[in-house]
Amino acid sequence: MSGHSHHSSATPTNLPSLLPNIYAILVALETLSHDPSLTPSRTLDRGGAGRLAHAMDVEYDMIVLGTGLKECILSGLLSVDRLKVLHMDRNDYYGGDSTSLNLNQLWKRFKGDATPPANIGASRDYNVDMVPKFMMANGALVRVLIHTGVTKYLSFKAVDGSYVFNKGKIHKVPSTDMEALKSPLMGLFEKRRAGKFFLYVQDYKENDPSTHKGLDLNKMTSKELISKYGLDDNTIDFIGHAVALYKEDSYLSEPAIETVKRMKLYAESVARFQGSSPYIYPLYGLGELPQGFARLSAVYGGTYMLNKPDCKVEFDGEGKVCGVTSEGETAKCKKVVCDPSYLPGKVKKVGKVFRAIAIMSHPIPNTAESHSVQIIIPQKQLGRKSDMYVFCCSYSHNVASKGKFIAFVSAQAESENPEAELKPGIDLLGPVDELFIDIYDRYEPANDPSSDNCFISTSYDATTHFESTVMDVLSLYTKITGKTIDLSVDLSAASAAEDDF
């Protein structure tokens, strides 16, 4: 099972935000449980298959393969739309590539038979995300969580810091005109210019032309808008990569409206919890998310089967999906949603991610003792073609033993040498107790879903925030259903327990 099956979903930390939803949770827990020995009717491991022998005889609207975060969000969204969904995974744990590991699992993955040293704490205290990402407080993932009601299975806590690496130093990312005026990232005159630009962005309302100051941001490029305010390359670098969160610089030649929207999202997310970062993160880590969506799907009648080996997608004479076979039984379906590993013949390799995972006994230096923090290292600062990301969380989010911190350094690979390539990020961490290097290939679909009805997600990228992941999910949802999800939700539904902020 996944790395944190030790805690139930209603630990004391969760209760304040969950009380109104206790009934829903009891229903959900009935329907889905961590413990295979309590496997209820709708969640099948191989041993429990007899209890729902007919599960494979039914025709489904949709079979989802893999319980990675993207697949689980889609399965939840489609179940809420009342589609008949069967969700299978070859593993006996949730999360696929985006799973969360305890210490024993982490050691097994990276060190084989060695056992973790006793001084770093109990294995079960750890939930180490294999694809670590923070959520923007007002961002698309939080809106999807609220839209589907999955927030009731999770508790969030604000992330302490958002930093950017600039000219060899780490600086807090300014997000308002006031912060710009205080920031050591810029000289005196540049601060004033940046302050004016931030003010324009803060006041800008798309449907109120009086706030546009005569500029048409749908026609004007980001570069043209920024040069109107006379900002230098250094300022443009941190605004584009650490506030608007672009992965590379092509946005400069695209319409400015998108950059302004992204900057507004950042500032509004910071303001949301009066914190010093725009990010939030679930207690016990991201492994909670796939399980939350699995519960949601089960509540709406979706069927889950873990530990199903060799899921083989079957096609009819016209090359359209007609079912999935596992252990000699075929379940019929109209469409398949899966991660790239289930249809290797229909994807193409698009790169590789290098990630260092460090266990430490201190926060990252120069981050104001932040217990959770993101540092973006824009590509230009290192002469790279893509940004490098540093992510740190700790026992404050219940993902490590007391006093321990987990830091990750991630980058799209541009060489064959992960240690050397990640060094600029690893050097920011200070002394580490343990260091692991993870490498994985990234794939994206190469098929035409309109002709084969296979909807394949793209592998997770190196970013340490969720915006690109959710965009992939929403575009897949639209391809599958022809609909767009309305994400104008009441954001206050995702407040965390008061004492967390």
Image (cartoon, rainbow, N blue to C red):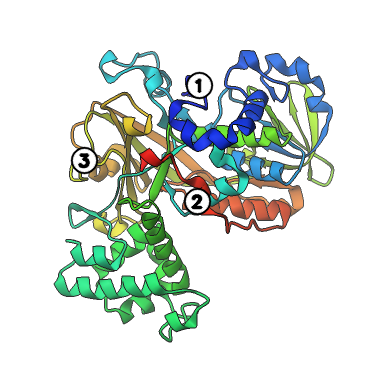
Left or right: residue 383 compared with residue 259? left
Residue 344 in which image quadrant: top right
Instruction: Give the residue at x 63% y 58%.
Output: 486
Quadrant of the drawing holding the N terminus: top right
Residue bearing mark 2:
492
Task: Report if residue 89 is visible in the image.
Answer: no
Name the residue nearer the viewer: 351 or 268: 268
Disc 1 residue type? Ser
Quadrant of the drawing holding the C terminus: top left
Label disc, if present, on residue 484 of the rendered structure: none
Q: Position of residue 234 (x, y in %)?
A: 24, 66
Q: CA distance from mark 1 to mark 3?
A: 30 Å
Q: CA distance from mark 2 to mark 1?
A: 29 Å
Residue bearing mark 3:
369
Which mark is nearer the camera, 2 or 3?
A: 2
Q: Residues within 10 Å of mark 1 (few under 14, many from 20)?
A: some
Left or right: residue 310 compared with residue 195? right
SS label for mark 2: helix
Q: Position of residue 351 (x, y in %)?
A: 46, 47
Residue 382 in which image quadrant: bottom left
With respect to residue 25, does 364 lie above or below? below
Name the residue nearer the viewer: 115 or 164: 164
Left or right: residue 192 compared with residue 338? left
Report if the CB atoms under discs 1 and 3 are less than 8 Å apart: no
N-terminal of the pair, mark 2 or mark 3, is 3
SS label for mark 3: loop
Residue bearing mark 1:
5
